[in-house]
Amino acid sequence: MHEEYRILCQVFPEAVCALHFHNPFELLVATVLSAQTTDKRVNSVTPELFERYPDPAAMAQAQPNELEAIIHPVGFYHAKARHLLGLSLMLTEDYGGKVPRTMEELTSLPGVGRKTANVVLGNAFNIPGFPVDTHVTRVTGRLRWRTDWRSTHPDPVKIEHEICDCFPPEDWTNLSHRLILHGRATCHARKPDCLHCPLAETCPSAELLAGPASR
């Protein structure tokens, strides 16, 4: 496990959040918008969004239809607009317009689950957090870094705890970034590029996934 992560550190020396942001509020909003879509698509709408609504107080006063029109390209825009309005109002009324710094407080906000909270903690506040998304779930399963790798519906919280137990807290955020980058670049969901994978020599799934042409 740790040797494989060492290789990922060499392949992806710059582990940074793919979402564009300038402050904790922008990252929180962008991460909520990123559900069921790509970071690239989120980054295409956030410049206009944050120009119109630069802080929680401004966004809390947004007209729902105007907010929906801006975020329409990211999908699920009705629900996401409700979440943004709700969390902006809650930040304004309960937290003095500031994004809180604890898992409990963050997950009390509308539309904010554990994954989003970990993204904000790790990338906005440098507080150790290990976001578990579909890439992290897939890659850790194929590498068999977790005991439930056979499960078709693994529990993200269990994955988070099991992987975090194997690494020091200061590695958690960048570990998640690198697993996501590896999932996007090589360990694809449908057709993983095992032939060119830097982890192929030790990955227990490589021979099964590579296909006859790669053997």
Image (cartoon, rainbow, N blue to C red):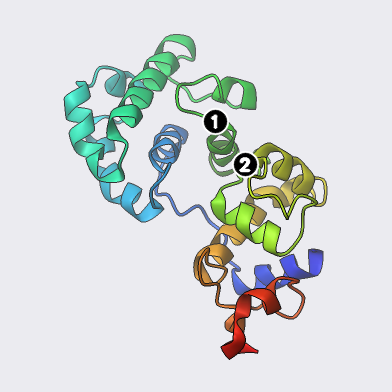
Q: What crowding class fits label 1: few (fewer than 14 Cα within 10 Å), some (14-19), or many (20 or more)?
A: some
What residue appears at the point 37 percent right and 15 percent down from the top-left corner?
89
What residue appears at the point 61 percent right and 54 percent down from the top-left corner?
136
* Residue type at the position of mark 1: Gly
Residue 197 spot, x, y in % from top left = 62, 78
| Front in this rendered view, residue 117 or 151 | 151
Q: Quadrant of residue 178?
A: bottom right
* Residue type at the position of mark 2: Asn
- The dot on residue 126 is 2
Q: Quadrant of the N terminus?
A: bottom right
Note whether residue 199 is visible.
no
What residue appears at the point 30 percent right and 31 percent down from the top-left corner?
54
- CA distance for labels 2 and 1: 18 Å
Looking at the image, is 140 positioned above or below residue 197?
above
What residue appears at the point 74 percent right and 81 percent down from the top-left corner?
201
The residue that label 1 is drawn on is 113
| Front in this rendered view, residue 99 or 103 | 103
